[in-house]
Image: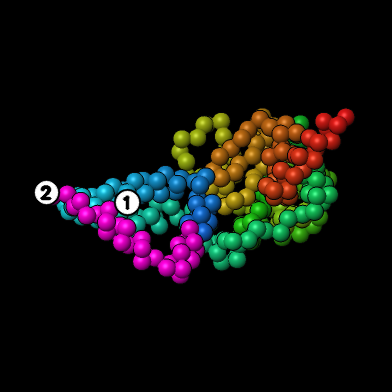
Amino acid sequence: MAIDFNFPERLRGLVSTIGLLDYLDILIVTILFYQIYQQIHDTRAITLVKGLMVIVLIKLICDGINLHAMSWFLEKSVNWLFVALPILFQPELRRALEHIGQGQFFTSSSLLKREDAEAAVGEIVKTAKKLSSTKTGALMVIERKMKLNDISSTGIYIDGIISSEFLLNVFIVNTPLHDGAAIIRGNRLISAACVLPLTENHTLSTELGTRHRAALGLSEQCDALIVVVSEETGTISVAENGRMVRHLDGQTLAAKIRPAFVGEEGYSLLKKISSKWGGGK
């Protein structure tokens, strides 16, 4: 099979035909791909995307050296993978579509002012520590960019300013609001006793009960932070992007949830200010 040695010349000829609108087109597509990457970079879908990129690269090489049979096989494989993609990665696709539908694909959500954010973080940490000391089970979902109206509608609508006393009353044992999750949006408790989807990950430790599996299940489908207090051990955990960090104390819990209220940029600024004043003492 002959190798096409004219491929570099053909490639240079193609590049020479690119105009201003073509550069604009490439820029738009680049931004679009970057936004898609931001949505999936911490999910299972990124593994599939990397595999697809390898296959496409191999196919381009096969086209360049005229390996027609191999190129045909790879093209058919990619087509079948794209058919299976919506089935295999429904949560990730749902997350991206919800971002677009809410107009948040290119914009960030409204965040709290620094004082309000610190107050909200303090009340949640205080609540989690108190619940941990009494081994009272709890699920607190901190909404971020993606709205959780479908989840909050499964519980009891409340809509009140959060405080430690308020949240502790919600999780009193043997009351209607105790079982289920509380949904927090900004500095307000939207609803309680909400039902969360369970994770489909069957490799989890047997130490993790239904609360932890529900927290992981929701974190796999949206960008929320879910604070879990174990009823058996009093351990405080946080689920995010399908992963769980356990055995948190008050300080580490505050550091973990603060970005959900002030944003990543605001959190970085707060750390710089704190370190500056701390170094000056």
Q: Which of the two discs, 2 and 1, sits closer to the camera?
A: 2
Secondary structure beneath dot 2 equals loop
Colour scheme employed for the rendering of this structure: rainbow
Give me the disc on residue 1.
2
Instruction: Determine if residue 57 is in view.
Output: yes
Q: Nearer the viewer, residue 4 or 260?
A: 4
Decide if residue 107 is on the left or right side of residue 29.
right
Q: Which residue is mark 1?
A: 56
- In the image, is residue 98 above or below residue 244? below
Is 116 left, or right, of 87 in this rendering?
right
Q: Which residues are magenta?
A: 1-30
The kind of residue on which mark 2 rests is Met
- 272 w.r.t. 32: above or below: above
Q: Residue furthest left?
A: 1
Inspect this view and state whether residue 77 appears. Answer: no
Give the quarter of the figure containing the C terminus.
Answer: top right
